[in-house]
Amino acid sequence: MKKLQAAVIATFVTAGAALSSSAHAALDAAQVTAIQTEVLGDVSTAVGAGFAVLAVSLASSIGFSLVGRFISKGANGG
């Protein structure tokens, strides 16, 4: 009788462990998806800011180059 009780208990414990691990796996997948969404949002924000800084830097460089040429031509009379 005790062997039968031990077998039944072992079966329930094994089934409980399997169900528990699959529930944790589903929870982990949901957490991974949430983290992935947050990271992608942060990356897109950083990329947008990077392009804005690049545009300002490039515009400043082009602007100073044009001003330098304008001054050079004016100084040389041409």
Image (cartoon, rainbow, N blue to C red):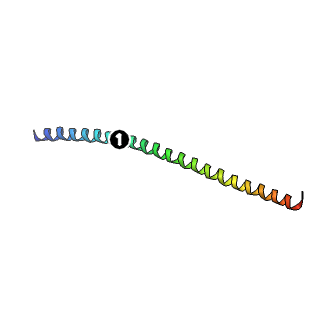
At 39% from the left and 40% from the top, the residue drawn is 30
- Count of picture labels: 1
Q: Left of 58 or right of it: where is 76?
A: right
Q: Taking 47 as reference, is 2 left or right? A: left
The residue singled out by tag 1 in the image is 27
Q: In which quarter of the image is residue 60?
A: bottom right
Looking at this rendering, what residue extends furthest in the left direction?
Answer: 1
Q: Residues within 10 Å of mark 1 (few under 14, many from 20)?
A: few
Q: In the image, residue 69 lies at what x, y percent? A: 81, 57
Question: x, y (%) of residue 6?
Answer: 15, 41
Residue at (85%, 58%) from the top-left corner? Answer: 74
The residue lying toward the viewer, choosing from 51 and 22, is 51
- 76 or 58, which is in the foreground? 76
Residue placed furthest toward the bottom: 75
Provide residue 5's location: percent of width, then percent of height. Answer: 13, 39
Image point 64% across, 52% down: which residue? 54
Under circle 1, the secondary element is helix
Asked whether, in this view, residue 49 is left or right of residue 6, the answer is: right
Q: Position of residue 78 (x, y in %)?
A: 89, 57
Q: Which image quarter is the N terminus in?
A: top left
Identify the residue shown where x is 77% and y is 56%: 67
Q: Residue furthest right?
A: 78
Q: Residue flagged by tag 1: what amino acid is it?
A: Leu
Quarter of the figure with residue 8: top left
Left or right: 16 as drawn, with respect to 69: left
Q: Quadrant of residue 44?
A: top right
